[in-house]
Image (cartoon, grey):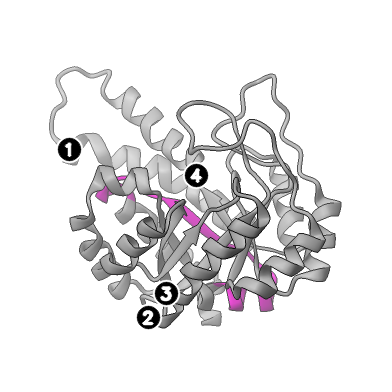
Amino acid sequence: MLTTGRHLLEVAHEHGFAVPAFNISDWAMCRGIVEISEELQAPLIIAIHPDELSHVGADLVPAIIARAHRASVPVSIHLDHGTTYEHVLLAVQAGFTSVMIDGSTLPLRKNIALTSRVVETAHAVGVSVEAELGTIGQTDGEAEAGANTIVHTDPDDAVRFVAETGIDSLAVAIGTSHGIYPSWMKPELKLDLLRQLASVVSTPLVLHGGSANPDAEIAEAVTRGINKINISSDIKAAYYTRMRAVLADAGLREPNVIQPPCITAMKETAAHKIKLFRAKGAAGLY
């Protein structure tokens, strides 16, 4: 069932769980993510970053939409980290049901102006909007772009930002980074800040950079008010690590031999996240 991000997160907010947003970068990953969500009866956000969209091509989006319509769980198709108004227009025209406008590196006034423009356009056609306040870090060159210095979300700014933009969900910066953390880097969430943000903002909150954070911290973040968690690096690492092992057999060449074990590895990682986010079985709430 295809739906909007707003609908998914309103229910998650009411019932105290987080909807997983899994970034996909090919059709096999998309199929696998929908399958594991159906197996665990979990709501799903299929996230596609502009870089991923340029890789798979907008022509794949109708197939993703068709698969979402057939799904036995609610599914939203979400533009992840669009940084320009044009990114959002492309996603809306392609059939996305949710978009993120990321003006987090802009001064607050300009972030509000850009986000408000996106909200006006997207809401006019029933598309939900996520925005970001504060900055997410970056662990390596393979990850989505991030800031060299994390700027944590200010609660007072968050109240103003939500009120003036009319967004449907807010991505907050509480200490995460995009990518896989190197061994010397210890991820640590500012859970007290999250509690404070959740107490002053009624809009569902989103956690980016959720890969590789300790399970206990992620579980606590859900308890304290996070309703959507983005997972990209973890499932891609599982998928391609297994693919490297499979391709050690130089005689293999057929995708229907090479890819199934890779999809299985990705699904195992995704299943763990779904359960950690308390989303297993939550499709029945919609």
Residue at numbered disc 1: 255
The residue under the point 35% across, 43% down is 51
| Distance from Cα at disc 1 to Cα at disc 2 | 38 Å
Residue 74 visible in image: no
Who comes first in sequence, dot 1 or dot 2? 2
Residue 125, disc: 2
| Distance from Cα at disc 3 to Cα at disc 2 | 7 Å
Residue 20 visible in image: yes
- Whether residue 285 is in magenta: the answer is no
Contact (Cβ within 8 Å) of mark 1 with mark 3: no
Residue at numbered disc 3: 121
Who comes first in sequence, dot 3 or dot 4? 3
**What residue type is disc 3 on?**
Thr
| Distance from Cα at disc 2 to Cα at disc 4 | 35 Å
Left or right side of 222 for 125: left
Q: Nearer the viewer, mark 1 or mark 3?
A: 3
The residue under the point 37% across, 74% down is 72
Q: Nearer the viewer, mark 2 or mark 4?
A: 2
- Whether residue 13 is in magenta: the answer is yes
- Across and down, in percent, residue 22 comes to 46, 53
Q: Nearer the viewer, mark 3 or mark 2?
A: 3
Residue at numbered disc 4: 269
Contact (Cβ within 8 Å) of mark 3 with mark 2: yes
- Across and down, in percent, residue 252 comes to 16, 25
Contact (Cβ within 8 Å) of mark 3 with mark 4: no
The residue under the point 73% across, 75% down is 202
Who comes first in sequence, dot 4 or dot 1? 1
- Across and down, in percent, residue 46 comes to 41, 59
Q: Which residues are magenta?
A: 9-29
